[in-house]
Image (cartoon, coloured by chain):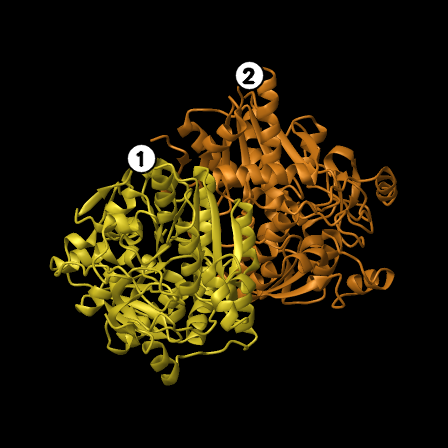
Chain colours: A orange, B yellow
Amino acid sequence: MNTRKIILSEKEMPTKWYNITADMPNPPQPVLHPGTKQPVGPQDLAPLFPMALIEQEVSTQKFIDIPEEILNHLTLWRPSPVFRAYNLEKALGTKSHIYYKYEGGSPAGSHKPNTAIAQAYYNKKEGVKRLSTETGAGQWGSSLALAGTLFGLEVKVYMVKVSYEQKPYRRALMETWGASVVASPSKDTNAGRKILEADPNSNGSLGIAISEAVEDAVGREDTKYALGSVLNHVLLHQTIIGEEALKQMAIAGEYPDVVVASHGGGSNFAGLAFPFLREKIHGKKVRVVAVEPAACPTLTRGQYTYDFGDTVGLTPLVKMYTLGHDFMPAGIHAGGLRYHGASALVSQLVHEGLIEATAVKQNDVFASAITFARSEGILPAPESSHAIHQAVLEAKQADEEGKSRVILFNLSGHGHFDLTAFTQYLAGQMKDSSISDADLKKGLATIPVV
Amino acid sequence: MNTRKIILSEKEMPTKWYNITADMPNPPQPVLHPGTKQPVGPQDLAPLFPMALIEQEVSTQKFIDIPEEILNHLTLWRPSPVFRAYNLEKALGTKSHIYYKYEGGSPAGSHKPNTAIAQAYYNKKEGVKRLSTETGAGQWGSSLALAGTLFGLEVKVYMVKVSYEQKPYRRALMETWGASVVASPSKDTNAGRKILEADPNSNGSLGIAISEAVEDAVGREDTKYALGSVLNHVLLHQTIIGEEALKQMAIAGEYPDVVVASHGGGSNFAGLAFPFLREKIHGKKVRVVAVEPAACPTLTRGQYTYDFGDTVGLTPLVKMYTLGHDFMPAGIHAGGLRYHGASALVSQLVHEGLIEATAVKQNDVFASAITFARSEGILPAPESSHAIHQAVLEAKQADEEGKSRVILFNLSGHGHFDLTAFTQYLAGQMKDSSISDADLKKGLATIPVV
């Protein structure tokens, strides 16, 4: 019997998160206050986050212990498996070895609960009663709803309208776990009302929804804000993925030539990639590739500069790749990848040449998703399918060069909530949006001069 | 760290299925030809099934080897975990220990691929090109679609109309895996056309859909039929669940006082229960409880007698508990439990007193499902929620008696495709159908005299 699934026991589960700032060639760029343009301090962030998370946000400690209560909750689905994709390799006729880390086994169906549970834990510990957040495809919102019910916290979710309409089941999932969900832009906040006034038919975007959730948290004493990606502490919590994968590849007896993950805000990417980047920084030969949608090509066509994390301009200014905080991506199905910016850490590592970035088109992504579903059996999320497609391209390129690559990608979630997208693709009705030069120019023009 | 998840390695995965007919106090009752009323032989079943499955259907061998290629495919999600439901126990305030076997980790989200993969394997091996089948909630149809794509077989699914309409995502999942799906009753078969003539608005039922799928297979040389429950070989393939659970409870250091599973056609029930029944038959003290919906109370209010497996009367006559092959259950959300009959093996074991049966109401089931989702985190399928509810009742009853029970139940699938049902329940709009005496009488009157 060929071992296709490489598992770890609970005892082998990593007990520390990895903080890449300890190993980066250059120190991280400071985050600036939107008013003063001076570096923000812990006191600026205190209305939004509990102190433990603020400390993690600025920590330079290389490894941070995972509290036992968090580990206990993570065991609901962790350690997650790594699969050798024998059937996909056969379907492609490739000589390359393709592995994938599967994060879809969590109750929410993606990697997002890795940080949701950690964030709920620290908020609960510091006496917070209620969390506000935004969600794109719904994977983050449902993950925080799950974490909220496990820790007894109220959760309010601002869901990007295009996803709210395309993914009613994801919304119902959040409500089943006890969260309140509203379509963003909503009438519940000043930020939402302002957008609706300008465009009552706004599709919404992650940027807008962030503005709303931040405003909600700032306005209420009992509430803090939780973000599902982008921030350093969020990426930190996801590194358990890559720490597990390192152990699993060692069991497989292979080391990846290339590590691939889709990129929206950066969390599933960093989760898998950062532990491998640690080894790359210390001399190991490995390529690390971030894959983004051609409709929202932040890393490949954005500018590396200071910009707001949200649309309205409430958040601190972050040095990152950005398409402009006012950029509105097309309504592609990978809602989780529709973000104008990127995490500061991933951006800096791209800028320094440690990470490669590439952009791919929606129809190509779904073609590879179908090939994967029909060979490996697992139905992938549209976001994760970007990584699948890039893995397929890497394998084909290696074959063309007469080589064999070891490819590891992150299958960050299942697509059980995304079946309208597959139906549309199978019916030949899927649009293939790329950003236009005019939209790109218009978006970039909204970047503030710092 | 409390170990909540008990896992097995691939090496510990059972390599044999358990055939309970070898241990039953009385031999199984013969299946009768619908025309001659004489016991059917292998040649009668040959148009429907490959010979290997017919042999399993009548085998009296106690253990049957699982072929390596099947084991290889099963490792995609097997061995499946057993969880100690610490959080549910806490939410209930019970002194009992509650464990659940979780089968929702399969790519289709339920236990059904355990047999779908086995059936596809044997059909492929005997040269079959196409499979026809029926599906209720869609869990079986999607499982066969999955198995079909893994083995390169065409799949045609007749889906009970009420589920086809309530669960469009489940249908899309089948299509994504390459299967053709049609609402049953359909115009594609004589059986379907006959039903539609009598009632153009028929909700459909598993019985009708079976009639259609059987007619399809009998009419085409390249096609065989695949059934997702009821038959001996199907139950056999599911026993890997209970074989794993026996090992896992030994690791936990506890033996269940009571084993609970929901009951529709019998496959998830038998899968978990039969290996424990083997030990019960050989003297071990354990109660085994089948839970069915009050809207379709086959085991608790049906008659133990010969009846057709389908609605139209094409299948052999099976000695089983039945509400009458013409009985039409209400459109409850647990589509997989809307079957007028039961498996011959489970029926006989209920009749002989080895298995207890109980019926529960839809709103009570969903109340327990919500309690479970909000404490344990996993969103359960409506079918599986029947088992959850019974486990909750068992724990409460033990508390009332001042005792502590060890309870093991089968969480046969996740509810990611069933969120309309949860939305309806949370909105207070769920109907609470029980069978009426008139409907019961009307159904029982359709049982043929053999």
Q: Is residue B445 visible?
A: yes
**Where does the image place residue A449, in percent across and percent down from the top left?**
87, 42
Q: Is residue A92 left or right of residue B247?
A: right
**Where does the image place residue A182, in percent across and percent down from the top left?**
68, 65
Q: Is residue A114 left or right of residue A29?
A: left
Q: Is residue A166 left or right of residue B109?
A: right
Q: Is residue A95 above or below residue B162?
A: above
Instruction: Give the residue number, with chain letter if any, for mark 2.
Output: A403
How would you rate the neighbour count of disc 2 (Cα within 10 Å): few for under 14, some for 14-19, many for 20 or more?
Answer: few
Q: Is residue B144 above or below residue A410?
A: below
Q: Nearer the viewer, mark 1 or mark 2?
A: 1
Q: Are marks 1 and 2 in contact (CB under 8 Å)?
A: no
**Where does the image place residue A211, in percent across and percent down from the top left?**
75, 57
**Where does the image place residue A325, in percent across and percent down from the top left?**
80, 47
What's the chain of the residue with tag 2?
Answer: A
Instruction: Give the residue number, with chain letter if any, for mark 1.
Output: B68
> Could you say which quadrant of the image residue B369 lies in?
bottom left
**Quadrant the C terminus of chain B occupies:** bottom left
How would you rate the neighbour count of disc 1 (Cα within 10 Å): few for under 14, some for 14-19, many for 20 or more?
Answer: few
Which is more toward the observer, B43 or B280? B43
In whole angstroms, how far apart are the C-alphas of marks 1 and 2?
31 Å
Which is more toward the observer, B353 or B97? B353
Q: Which residue type does callout 1 highlight? A: Glu
Q: Is label 1 in a helix, a strand or a loop?
A: helix
Q: Outermost residue, front direction?
A: B36
Q: Which residue type does callout 2 highlight? A: Lys
